[in-house]
Amino acid sequence: MKTAPPMLVLAALVAGCASGASSSASASSARLSVANSTTIPVTLVVNGAVVEIVPPGVAEDPVKAALPPLPWSVETRSTSGRVLSTMTVKPGDSAGSFGDAVRADLACGRLDIWSGPPMLGPMFSPDPSRPCD
């Protein structure tokens, strides 16, 4: 029985891994992430359905809950139901160094939601005009 030269086997393995990675990457390219740096639990709502409650001080990159297919209408809400932030994610929005994101600097901390790369920006500055509940 003849065996393939080691370099040919290695090339086939690399090609197989690359093709598997690219197909799974395109299937799961849309990710949603949250960083709740507030002192309150925040309800994450996608397309009108509660996805999860994110405890204070918790970050998930990406969110572990199952998400519906795109497009997404994303909201975060306080425990009283007040909308804290909103954003829309459409197919193709997140590519390379681009994505969708929303930041809310509230009286009780910062809330970031993003799809794509994480947000950068200025340090947190509490906004007393934006109460948490």
Image (cartoon, rainbow, N blue to C red):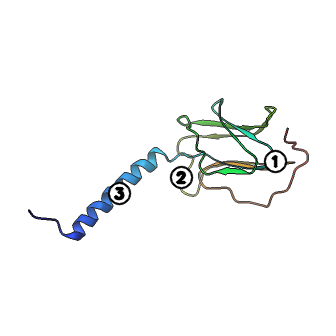
Label 1 – label 2 distance at C-alpha:
32 Å
Q: Nearer the viewer, mark 1 or mark 2?
A: 1
Residue 74: image location, x then y, percent: 66, 38
Callout 2 amino acid? Ala
Residue under pointer 1: 39
Within 10 angstroms of label 3, few (less than 14), some, or many (20 or more) residues? few
- Nearest to the eye among marks 2 and 3: give it: 3
Q: Secondary structure at mark 2?
A: loop
In which quadrant is the C terminus drawn?
A: top right
Work out whether residue 82 or residue 2 is closer to the camera in this orientation and state it: 2
Q: Is residue 55 left or right of residue 107?
A: left
Mark 1 or mark 3, earlier in chain: 3
* Label 1: which secondary element: loop
90 above or below 97?
A: above
Look at 22% across and 66% down and name the residue there.
8
Q: Are marks 1 and 2 in contact (CB under 8 Å)?
A: no
The amino acid beneath tag 3 is Cys
Q: Amino acid at mark 1?
A: Thr
- Determine the image quadrant of residue 43: top right
Q: Residues within 10 Å of mark 2 (few under 14, many from 20)?
A: some
> What's the distance in space between the residues labelled 1 and 3, CA to CA?
43 Å
Label 1, residues with CA under 10 Å away: few <14, some 14-19, many ≥20: some
Residue designated by label 2: 95
**Which corner quadrant holds the N terminus?**
bottom left
Residue at disc 3, secondary structure:
helix
Give the number of the mark in front: 1 or 3: 1
- For disc 3, the marked residue is 17
Q: Earlier in the sequence, mark 1 or mark 2?
A: 1
User: Residues under labels 2 and 3: Cα distance?
Assistant: 21 Å
Q: Is residue 110 above or below residue 89?
A: below
* Residue furthest left in the image: 1
